[in-house]
Image: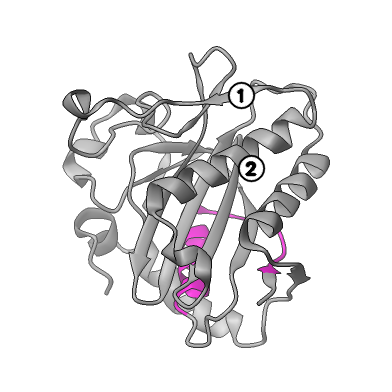
Amino acid sequence: MPLLVYPYQIAHGAINMATDFWLFQQKDLIDPVFRHYGWINNEITFGYGQNWNWVKKQNQVKGLQITRRPTGGGIVQHGRDWTYTLILPHKHASSRVPALDFYEAIHLSIGNALLAQKFPTTLMPCPVQKEKQKGIPGDCFLEPVGKDLMNKSGSKKIAGAAMKRTKKGILIQGTIDISMFSNLDLDRFYKFFVKEIENLLFEKTQIERWPVEFDHEHKFYVKQFASSTWLENRKLI
């Protein structure tokens, strides 16, 4: 099973979410999938389980385009981050790894890619049992959770991710705050990170093109993620 890597795209939030979900919904989803993508403007995404009425009142979302993700987690600010998606099909061995263990592994992979350019990192420790908090984080980068990737001192969150698990497999949407790395070679980082994912999944990269049916089928998902029923009530029309 190769690791299918799709071309880089820059788009608005609804389009980015639609592309991820289109990839996740493919009937012939057999191989793991990876893509890295960008944002036309500064935008906000928020988690599947968050309350819209609460989200829209938060200061950090005012004046920005907002899209609900199909995955969990809290509010994330996009536009200057490094965003990626990883899909683990149900039949792939990696989908059976416990969620927290895989969350840790992928953040260690990001940490290794940063360390290759002499940017050391650390992982946010998991709270002890009596300190564990229930509920959804409000703002992902202001409320780090266990196994998030942090800077060397542990004072600032660098990377986090949200997951959706279904019978098809696992959809992972991750973001990396690269604003603190002024001299980071992004192309080198990308290649190193993909190699880390290859090692993590025991697969080799296969570069993919968008298939001919993508444009037609993708439009349906864009309509879904741009709709008010999805934004406000997480219902696909």
| Foreground of the two, 160 or 81 | 160
Left or right? Give the position of 66 relative to 53. right
Q: Secondary structure at mark 2?
A: helix
The x and y percentages for residue 233 are 19, 58
- Identify which residue is drawn at 69% across, 74% down: 2
The x and y percentages for residue 111 are 64, 33
The x and y percentages for residue 132 are 21, 29
Residue tagged 1: 121
CA distance separating discs 1 and 2? 11 Å
Q: Is residue 172 above or below residue 177?
A: below
Q: Is residue 173 visible?
A: yes
Left or right? Give the position of 230 relative to 203. left
| Foreground of the two, 111 or 178 | 111
State yes or no: residue 178 in magenta. no
- Identify which residue is drawn at 32% across, 64% down: 227
- Identify which residue is drawn at 40% across, 76% down: 168
- The residue type indicated by label 1 comes to Thr
Looking at the picture, the colour scheme in use is: one colour
Q: Secondary structure at mark 1?
A: strand
The stretch in magenta equals 4-25
| Foreground of the two, 81 or 114 | 114
Q: Is residue 146 above or below residue 216?
A: above
Mark number, residue 109? 2
- The residue type indicated by label 2 comes to Ser
Q: Which of disc 2 and disc 1 is earlier in sequence?
A: 2
The x and y percentages for residue 219 are 49, 76
Left or right? Give the position of 100 relative to 196. left
At label 2, counting other C-alpha atoms closer than 10 Å, the crowd grade (few under 14, some 14-19, many 20 or more) is many
Res 121 → quadrant = top right
Q: Is residue 232 above or below residue 136?
A: below
State yes or no: residue 23 in magenta. yes
